[in-house]
Amino acid sequence: MIKTFKRIGLIFALLQLILSIVVVALMIKFNILPSFYIFVIVFVLTLFFLITGLFFISKSRFRVATAAVFSVIMCVVLSVASFKYIIPAMDTLEKITTKKQTYLATYHILTKADDEASKPEDVKEYYIGVEKSHDFDAMLKALEKIASEFEHVMNVVPYDDYSAMWTGFIERSETGAILMETNYYNIYREYYEEQGDNIANYVKILGDIQVEMAVENVKEDLPEIENKKEITRDPFVMYISGIDVEGSINQRSRSDVNIIMAVNPNTKKIVLATVPRDAYVKLPGISGDSYDKLTHAAIYGNNDCNVSIETLEQNIYNGINIDYWTKVNFTSLKKIVDALGGIEVYSEYAFTSTFSGKRVSFNKGMNQMDGEKALVFCRERVTVPGEEPQRGRNQLEVIKGIFNKATSPSIISNYNDVLDEISDCILTSMATEEITSLVKMQLDDGASWSFETVSVGVEYEYNYCYSIPGIKLCVGIVDEASRTAAVAKINEVLAK
């Protein structure tokens, strides 16, 4: 009997050894733990294996049985560590750092508010207006998808821009329906709200068509340009873009949040700078000499934040080179905060928001927030004192709350939940090894970071924008003094 126990036990002991080697190899490859932690884990696993081996060579049936049971338990523990925690974490980091080769464009099918049509197929005999100057290929693909679903050739009326299409539809009834990309629809929606009106008084949405488009000019055979910075030693700047949609992070959408985070890993200092979404700027390579809102920059280019980054570098943060970008959406924020177990956020004012459709109150001072409350805090700009500029400052406080919680020791217990939640709702240009290097540095030194925040101010007026040339939108003229002060503060933190 004891020989049988030994044979079975030796099989599990061999499996324990193999799994121990696999776990250590994965952790070394993941490169997220400091060398000391790796040494301790190797020491403990080796000690466990040696003790198991000594029990197996014993003549005591009890010791052999105990060793066999212990070896089985260790195999289970090591398997769970590998397949439930380490490998999924590696996969998540790979997913959020992989450049997307496609993006999603969504179009509303619109008729007038009093039209009898109630579903998309009701307009298949209508003349339908389309705009041909912005992302023409995506519009054609959406139109083809509609025609395929209707099994009917559409009667199309093309327009040079959305203003001409909207005017032809609303004022002259040149078409019975229009196909409108959701970002431009939202621009019109906000325009009517600013006038104390409601877009629903004019149009209704019959349905949506979403198409997946290949990113232009992506050459996979070209080598990656190496970032010369050593991220744990060299100061760097990251652009954080918060797009105004829920669901897939791969949607092309306006950037409601535009935050610059300057990080100095040597001094452990971070400065967060924000500028209102309505800042009136030129969009490099897009608008020529025309001006537009900063938030609209995100709907152009390859959906990789480059247009927004160039806009900020050339119009706001002159002389500052933005090294990385991270894109999040409303879904991201809620999931991240909830996965962290909630965060503490400072509010400069006490106020109550009805933004989400229900009353949400905030106290002056520190507030404990779950994901939904943090999202409301970030998005409210009507009932909060200071309105749009204060919303930007509130967003900075939420970023601080997330950073403080994410760098605290308590994150170790549920880091895998955090990674699992963010896998589909965050993208970054940082490489996987750069992220793990930062985490490794934080685990190694456990340092506390100091934060400063700065805001670029604007003066609001109404003016024409490149994206919608036919109407005047509320835009923010950048205040030069606050812009200069923000640049100076960023340079101060970046100085080694």
Image (cartoon, grey):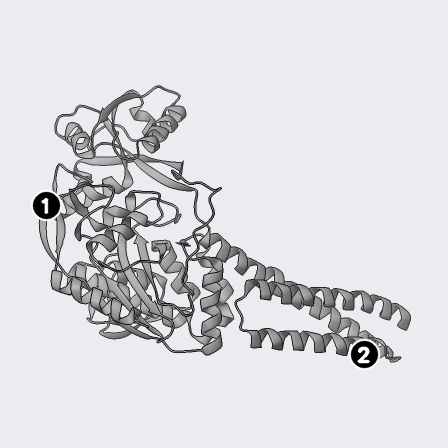
Which residue type carries mark 1?
Asn
Is 225 positioned to the left or the right of 198 in the image? right
Residue 418 in view of the camera: no
Q: Residue at point 65% right, 74% down?
A: 42
Is 307 positioned to the left or the right of 55 in the image? left
Q: In which quarter of the image is residue 286?
A: top left
Q: Which of 75 and 34 is in front in this view?
A: 34
Q: Where is residue 454 in the image (x, y as percent from the top left)?
A: 22, 67
Q: Residue at point 35% right, 19% down?
A: 153
In the image, which disc is placed on residue 54?
2
User: Which secondary structure lies at badge 2?
Assistant: helix
Q: Name the residue under label 1.
A: 463
Is 434 positioned to the left or the right of 38 in the image? left
Quadrant occupied by the C terminus: bottom left
Q: Quadrant of residue 386?
A: bottom left
Which residue type carries mark 2?
Leu
User: Which secondary structure lies at badge 1?
Assistant: strand
Q: Position of residue 430 (x, y in %)?
A: 42, 57
Give the CA separation, mark 1 to mark 2: 82 Å
